[in-house]
Image (cartoon, rainbow, N blue to C red):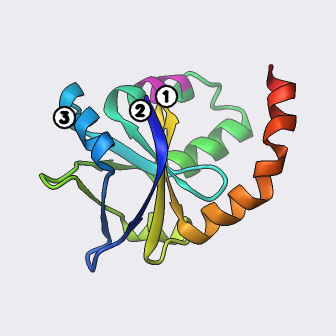
């Protein structure tokens, strides 16, 4: 499980360093591959290979004759990239995903249980400011 909020800056090669806590967990769990794709709400989703494969099976089991299934799978999988983290814990953001998430220089990396989300700093701040007041209201509906 991934937790926390971390702020980083892209280097000149569009890379950022994963937070130290995430790198420690990756090393401990011996995770070799990740998958990066378009996320929801304007962010990117980063999944460890094991979680990605589970999600892939679930999405592939849906009825492809339904328009919504085809639509979602097209956009979701066409944006996906297999990612390897380099020896210094850096991830390179492909241009098409950087554009999708409107990432320029500063990113916010948040742990959301089984996935990591990567946000443009401005988009995260806007999302958080708009939704933080709804947190309790949504909690009441969920529980």
Instruction: Report the disc number at residue 27.
Output: 3
Nearer to us in this view, 9 or 12: 9
State the residue at coordinates (18%, 34%).
Answer: 27
- Mark 3 touches mark 1? (CB < 8 Å): no
* Above/below status of 18 relative to 12: above
State the residue at coordinates (26%, 75%).
Answer: 13
State the residue at coordinates (37%, 43%).
Answer: 35
* Above/below status of 99 relative to 111: below
Count of numbered badges drawn on the protein: 3
Is 20 left or right of 140, judged from the image as shown?
left
**Residue 68 occupies quadrant:** top right
- The residue beneath circle 1 is 55
Quick check: can you spot residue 44?
yes
Circle 3 packing at 10 Å, graded few (<14), some (14-19), many (20+), is few
State the residue at coordinates (63%, 31%).
Answer: 64
Residue 76 x, y percent position in the rendering: 54, 47
SS majority, magenta? helix
Callout 3: helix, strand or loop? helix
Callout 2: helix, strand or loop? helix
Q: Earlier in the sequence, mark 3 or mark 1?
A: 3
Magenta-tinted stretch:
54-58
Residue 55 x, y percent position in the rendering: 49, 28
Q: Earlier in the sequence, mark 3 or mark 2?
A: 3
Residue 112 x, y percent position in the rendering: 53, 38
- The residue beneath circle 2 is 52
């Amino acid at each position: 499980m991934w937790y926390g909020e971390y702020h980083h800056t892209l280097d000149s090669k569009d890379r950022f360093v994963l937070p130290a806590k995430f790198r420690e967990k990756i090393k401990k769990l011996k995770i070799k591959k990740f998958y990066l794709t378009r996320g929801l709400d304007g962010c990117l989703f980063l999944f460890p290979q094991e979680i990605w494969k589970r999600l892939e099976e679930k999405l592939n089991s849906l009825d492809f004759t339904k328009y919504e299934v085809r639509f979602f799978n097209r956009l979701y999988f066409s944006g996906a990239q297999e990612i390897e983290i380099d020896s210094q814990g850096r991830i390179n953001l492909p241009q098409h995903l950087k554009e999708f998430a409107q990432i320029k220089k500063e990113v916010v990396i948040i742990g959301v249980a089984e996935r990591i989300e990567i946000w443009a700093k401005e988009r995260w701040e806007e999302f958080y400011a708009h939704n933080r007041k709804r947190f309790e209201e949504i909690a009441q509906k969920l529980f």
